[in-house]
Image (cartoon, helix red, strand yellow):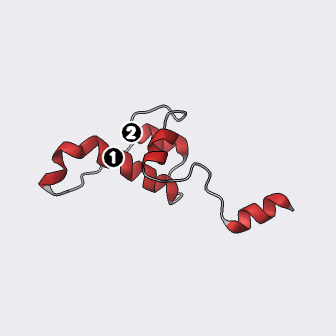
Amino acid sequence: MTTMTLQVPDALEKEHDETVRFLAAKFYEAGKLTLGQAADMVGMKKWDFPEVLAKFDVPYFLYTGDDLLNEFK
C-alpha cells in the first residue's frame, strides 16, 4: 500500500479517521477501489465496510441503468 500525505485544514486534525473513511467510501463509489481495497484503507474487514458506505450515503451495489437493463435481458 502506498502512503500519501494530504494537507487539510487544522479543523480536520481531530477528524483524521473520519476523513480517511470518507475518502475510502468516495473512492469506492467512483470505482477507483474495490470494496476490499476500501476496507483495507481504513483497517476494516470488507464485511464491516458497508456500514461506512451507509454513513456517507454511498450505495453498496454500484449499478448503472445500463447495467441493470443488461442483467434483466
Residue hosting label 1: 20
Drawn side of residue 65 relative to residue 60, left or right: right
**Residue shown at 78% from the left, 65% from the top:** 69
Say which element carries label 2.
loop
**Point 19% across, 57% down: residue:** 7
Q: Position of residue 50 (x, y in %)?
A: 52, 41
Q: Amino acid type of disc 1?
A: Val
**65 w.r.t. 56: above or below:** below
Q: Quadrant of the C terminus?
A: bottom right
**Circle 2 crowding by C-alpha within 10 Å: few under 14, some 14–19, many from 20:** some
Q: Residue furthest right?
A: 73
Q: Is residue 68 left or right of residue 11?
A: right
| Residue 3 visible in this rendered orientation of the protein | no
> Which residue type carries mark 2?
Val
Identify the residue at image location x=33%, y=46%: 20
Residue 18 in the image, given as x and y percentages of width and height: 31, 44
Task: Tell me the CA gap for discs 2 and 1.
Answer: 7 Å
Residue corresponding to mark 2? 42
Sequence-first disc among 2 and 1: 1
Q: Is residue 21 left or right of residue 53?
A: left
Question: Among all residues in the image, which is located at the extreme left?
Answer: 10
* Labels 2 & 1 near each other (Cβ < 8 A): yes
* Left or right placement of residue 51 versus residue 8 in this view: right
Residue 1 in sight here: yes
Residue 54: give x, y in percent of width and height.
48, 46
Residue 69 or residue 57, whichever sits in front: 57
Camera-side residue of 43 and 25:
25
Numbered disc 1: secondary structure: helix
